[in-house]
Amino acid sequence: MTYLIAGVVVISLIAVLMLIFGKKGGGMSAGGSGDHKNQAQIIRLANKKLAKDPYDPEGLFPIGDIYFSKQLWDKAFPVYMQLSKLPREKLTEEEYFLVLLRCGICAVHQNKFQEAVMSLSEANNLNSRNFEVNYYLGLACFKSQQYEKAIPCFKKALIAKSDAEGVYFYLGQALYFTKKYRDSLPCFKKALDEDPSNKEALYDMADAMTEEGHGEKAIKVFMHLRPDPVYGSKSCLHAGVYHRKVGDSETAIQDFEIGLKHETALPEIKLEIEYNLAQVYFEKNQVAKGLTLLKTIRNVNSNYKDVNALISRYQELSQNSNLQIYLSAGSSDFVTLCRKFIAARYKNAHVKIQDINVGPVFTDIVADVSTLKWSNVEVYRFFRTSGSTGELYVREFHGHIQDIKADRGFCVSAGTFTEEGRKYTEGRPIDLIEKSELVKVLKVISI
């Protein structure tokens, strides 16, 4: 029964071949009438052999060869699969190697990567130096996202044939996807030498440069790719992040705005661009624009990053310009606000600022405060944060009060202080001013 089924399958294949190659105008052949006659003759001979034995390699090989040479992968694959299952004594080692190789190549072209890896791995055991074996085995692993396994295959393929085109690109991507960014860079460079129009290689190379800390080199590539319909939106995102990092907010805004114009941008890239653009707007005190973008993000994804917290924060800032200055204005406006804050806390007192020290974490202002009844040297430490300030900072501030021999100190924050920080102030000349009290004073200040 098995032989009968196999015979029917083979006869069907032969019939299809006769239709393809035996009629006039058979468009699959690139050759002339002589090719048709030769193929027809080959098929007739194969037909005779397979009629007697459906598993006869002398009948299957010619059919497989015709299909393979015409790149009819879906038809060649079952022929070579059938040949691969023959008893080994029916095939020479060279024939068995060819069967496994071609079976694997056909499988790759049909996206049957598991079958491809099985055939090509066995072929590799027979000849580990063959270019096609290593290239297609690497390709099968690559296409099935087994990048670590693909890397040595592509390297061996290049050893076998150093001038083979296309291999460096796949090797570069395999290294890139496994985060071997430094190793991927020379591969992408060679891939671009082969094909300067390869935008995917150009983008991946620039991204690898960024990961390796060569942002100043990568930015030129990203700027070049900004208009590209495929890689433009991602390149705009990279360019904007870079320009924001180096303090060029105007160019960053331009990068992000160009990115949002790409209609083909992936939804996750568009959200990331909008999120970063909102951050730049906040840094430039354009709170209304930033809030609009955050609300757009929330409409698409209500749980995206810290969007909800940012909306709450900046809505409050939009209603309190002094709090906005406190948290995000330049040093000059911030110090002016702090001086007015100190003055607003004292009625019927003379306040003289003795010293101002602006630091990266906090700003200290020493003031001589005098009334008709008392006179103190007081130091204010302003933290520009909306988070929670811990005991370590409070303890350090107490040491500073003692060092400058101040009478009292005030820690001011747009956030809160930890419970440990509050406990530390007990019995010490320190007052903690948290956001609620800060906002009350800021509301009555005019700047």
Image (cartoon, rainbow, N blue to C red):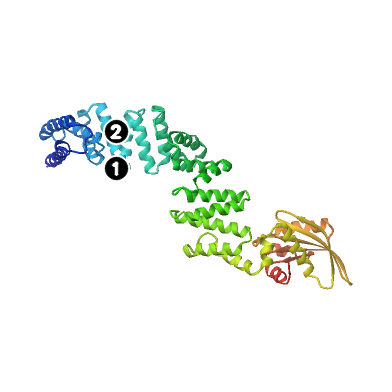
Pick the quarter of the image with the N terminus.
Answer: top left
N-terminal of the pair, mark 2 or mark 1, is 2
Q: Nearer the viewer, residue 357 or 406?
A: 357
In the image, what residue occupies the spot 72% across and 64% down? 412
Q: Above or below — where is 310 with respect to 161?
A: below
The x, y position of residue 216, in whole percent, is: 58, 42
Q: Which residue is mark 1?
A: 110
Q: Nearer the viewer, residue 296 or 58?
A: 296
Q: Which residue is mark 2?
A: 101
Q: Above or below — where is 305 with respect to 201?
A: below
Res. 68 image quadrant: top left
Dot 2: few (<14), some (14–19), or many (≥20) neighbours within 10 Å? many
Secondary structure type for disc 2? helix
Residue 244 visible in the displayed image = yes
| Mark 2 vs mark 1: in front | 1
Dot 1: few (<14), some (14–19), or many (≥20) neighbours within 10 Å? few
Res. 138 image quadrant: top left
In the image, what residue occupies the spot 58% across and 67% down? 312
Secondary structure type for disc 1? loop
Q: Amino acid at mark 2?
A: Leu
CB under 8 Å between callouts 2 and 1? Answer: no
